[in-house]
Structures are given as C-alpha cells and as structure tokens.
Image (tube, grey):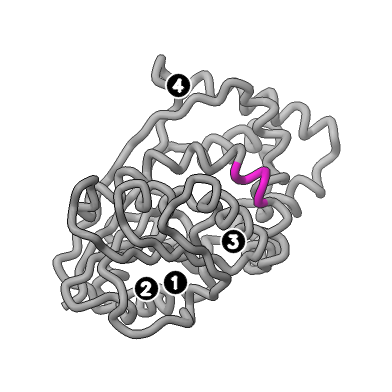
Amino acid sequence: MSEQAVGQIHRPEVWSSVASGYDDAIAPLMRPFAVATLDLLGLTGGTARLRLVDVAAGTGVVAVEAARRGAEVLATDFAPGMVELMRRRFAAEGLDARAEVMDGQALDLEDEGFDLGTSTFGLIFFPDPMAGLRELRRVLRPSGRVGIASWDRTRTGLPQLIGAALARVVPDLPAPPPPPWAQLYEAAGLGQALQAAGFIDVAVHQVVHHSKLPEPELFFRRLPDWTPPLRPLFASLPAEVIDRAAAAFGDVVGEHSTSEGMAQPALIGVGARA
C-alpha cells in the first residue's frame, strides 16, 4: 500500500465522506464476520446483560448485532460521518446502543468498564494497532474478552481478487510494500499481537464466509466511492484501463465463485484480560 493510500486511511473526513456508500456495499459483506465474532465471544441472545465497546465500528455492523443480542453497546469511530449514520440506525431500531467519535488508539473511556471489546476490520488499519489493542485491554474488566477480525492474506479473498484483476490489465503495476499492520493479516501475527498487548487464552480462528456480488463490474468501478485507500490508484489509471480492469474483475470473481458465491477468508482473534 502506497504512502498516499495509507494517508487516506488515516483521515477521518475521508471516511465520513464515504459512510453511505460503505454502508451499502461493504457493510453487508462484514455482517457474517460480526456474527462469528460475537458467537466466539459467547454473546448470544438471553445471556446476562453485558457491556460491549466496538472500536473503529464503521457503520455499526457489530454494534447493531450485539445490541440485538441484548448487550449494552458503545460504538466508537474516528469518522463523524460514520458515527452519525450509526446514531440514526440505533434510534430507528430503538436499540440500547450509542455511538461516539473517538480515536481507538486513545479511548476517552474509564478503565475496566466493559465486559467485551470488538473491532472487525478496523483496528487492524490503525497507525499503531498495538496502541489500539492496549486500549481495548485497558477498558475491559478482569476476565473481559476481546474479538478482533482481520483479513487473511494467506488465502484468496476479495482483496486478492481486486489485485488479480488489476494485474491482468496492468501487469507491470508495482507491488506495494507491506503496510505496517501486515502481521495482523496472518494467524500467527494476530495471535502474537494479542499476547503482546497483554491478553491471555489467545486463540485465532480461520473463518470463511461466501458472498455474492450481483454486479461485480459495477462493484469494481465504484470501489473508490467506499474504499478511500484505492482512490490514488484509480485516479492514476486511464478510463479505458479501469474499464478493462472492471471486466477482468468480473472474470476473476466468476472463476473463484461457487453456487454459494466467492469465498471471503478472515481471521478472528480472541483473548481475555487477566
């Protein structure tokens, strides 16, 4: 990932501007992993009342699911646009959940105030993901549990299919250097990071869900509308190259799909505060 793309990830106003598009296109792909994370943490309907904090919550996929299961939820994100969308959703559903603008690397929260902490495909992109993990540990009560979802770069999923489509059209496109958080995209690295942050009983689960993209070519063309890190790359490519890459993406999605859809491999790391 280029330095310019990394800069896009770390600008809250950029993510605010894509909140609606992200909610339409990406959030539905995230929901199965939100369900899996909460299942692994043992948050099921009818359990005792638990307090959960969701960090880098995006448009609230985990937060909504957790509140529906009976948790008292605080969802945080550094992008005001994401937070406003969550607030509207919580109010519309009458959920016991609130959303606040916060930097997940320095949460404005009391120590030991939550039973559960989560971050699905959010904390892994922090400038300092270890700071985010330490903050989650700080705000959890003793024996409180954490769940972190990350993409699995060792298997083929949506990020790899996007890269494969681009490679077919622009074979000499330079390979980006691994981002600072690359270790979290592998099971061993995610587990080691959780342990280094002070969590115990750490386990990393490989999870695969299948998703269908009814219009993969349109999905590809609109990637910059909900994935800001790709904007610099797309802006540098001529329109005809984007057209060919979109067609190539349709091909690779078809090649890697079954009747259930395309595989989405991810990692979910869980642990407990001592």
Q: Position of residue 205 (x, y in %)?
A: 24, 49
- Mark nearer the N terminus (3 vs 4): 3
Neighbourhood count class around disc 3 (C-alpha, 10 Å): few under 14, some 14–19, many 20 upward: many
* Residue highlighted by disc 4: 257
Identified by mark 4, the residue type is Ser
Dominant SS of magenta comes to helix
- Secondary structure beneath label 3: helix
Which quadrant is home to the N terminus? bottom right
| Left or right placement of residue 27 versus residue 233 in this view | left
The region drawn magenta spans 19-23
Q: Is residue 87 above or below residue 104?
A: above
- Mark nearer the N terminus (3 vs 2): 3
- Secondary structure beneath label 1: helix
> Given this view, does label 3 or label 2 mark the residue nearer the observer?
3
> Given this view, does label 2 or label 4 mark the residue nearer the observer?
2
* Residue highlighted by disc 1: 129
* Residue highlighted by disc 3: 83
Camera-nearest residue between 28 and 244: 28
